[in-house]
Image (cartoon, rainbow, N blue to C red):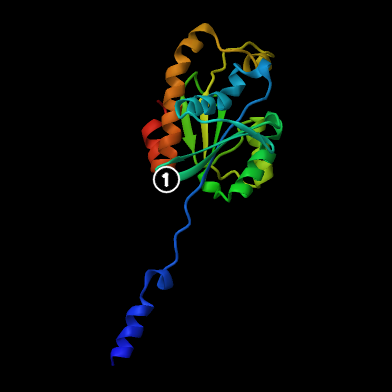
Amino acid sequence: MLAFFGRLFKSKKPSESTTATPMKKYLITGLGNIGPKYHNTRHNIGFQVLDAFAEANQLTWETEKLGDVAHTKIKGRPITLLKPNTYMNLSGKAVRYWLTKEKVDIGNLLVITDDLNLDFGTIRLKGKGSDGGHNGLKDIQAQLNTTSYPRFRFGIGDRFSKGKQVDFVLGEWSMDEALDLPERLETSCKIIESFVGAGLSSTMNTFNGK
């Protein structure tokens, strides 16, 4: 009888009867173009958000395969920050590589990009959607073969005359925009923290439209 109970209690040891839950990992990708001439342009807001986040958290960028990368944790959850060096139109190649390398679930990918259809500084988070004519999102969709991944759109407005869209997107911030940008970047950093710590739905409810 004692031997029976000994076997029973032994069989219930956590190491033998339970399986550890894998740690959630995240990939936060900011879209942009590499090179000094693009640094402060509207199209590079994805890079600018990640640079602000890295600076606030004293992170160091390292140039690795297909992009500049930094690593940190939020609430114990590992995060990879990625600025693709493939240029905007081939962003999907870098996203797919780092998703695979870091073994990140696609639901834990957040892509940060500019959006002409939103007023300057307006924030819109979604769990899926079309590319909206954005070449970076278009390539990510093609590489991942899905439109179902979280994205964070940062409004840059559409104050340009006919035929001047490219000049506007690749142009630098106006004086007024540059003055308001630091507050918007601070909010953007909070969005990254919320996405990892509280999830997409809660983050959408808190920040969309603000």
- Name which residue type carries label 1: Gly
Residue in the foreground of this view, choosing between 189 and 139: 189
Q: Does residue 7 appear left or right of residue 155 in this picture?
A: left
Q: Does residue 26 appear left or right of residue 183 in this picture?
A: right
For the residue carrying disc 1, how many other residues have a C-alpha within 10 Å: few (<14), some (14-19), or many (20+)?
A: few
Examine the rendered structure and indicate whether residue 149 appears above or below residue 10: above
Residue 11 x, y percent position in the rendering = 38, 79
Residue in the foreground of this view, choosing between 59 and 41: 59
Look at 66% across and 13% down and name the residue there. Answer: 162
Residue 104 x, y percent position in the rendering = 56, 48
Q: Does residue 18 appear left or right of residue 113 in this picture?
A: left
Q: Quadrant of the N terminus?
A: bottom left
Regarding residue 65, the answer to whether it shows in the image is yes
Examine the rendered structure and indicate whether residue 156 appears above or below residue 198: above
> To which quarter of the image does residue 41 belong?
top right
Q: Which residue is mark 1?
A: 76
Examine the rendered structure and indicate whether residue 172 appears above or below residue 82: above
Residue 133 x, y percent position in the rendering = 64, 30
Look at 40% across and 37% down and name the residue there. Answer: 194
Examine the rendered structure and indicate whether residue 1 appears above or below residue 207: below
Q: Residue furthest top?
A: 175
Residue in the foreground of this view, choosing between 197 and 131: 197
Q: Residue furthest bottom?
A: 1
> Mark 1: which secondary structure?
loop
Q: Quadrant of the C terminus?
A: top left
> To which quarter of the image does residue 7 belong?
bottom left
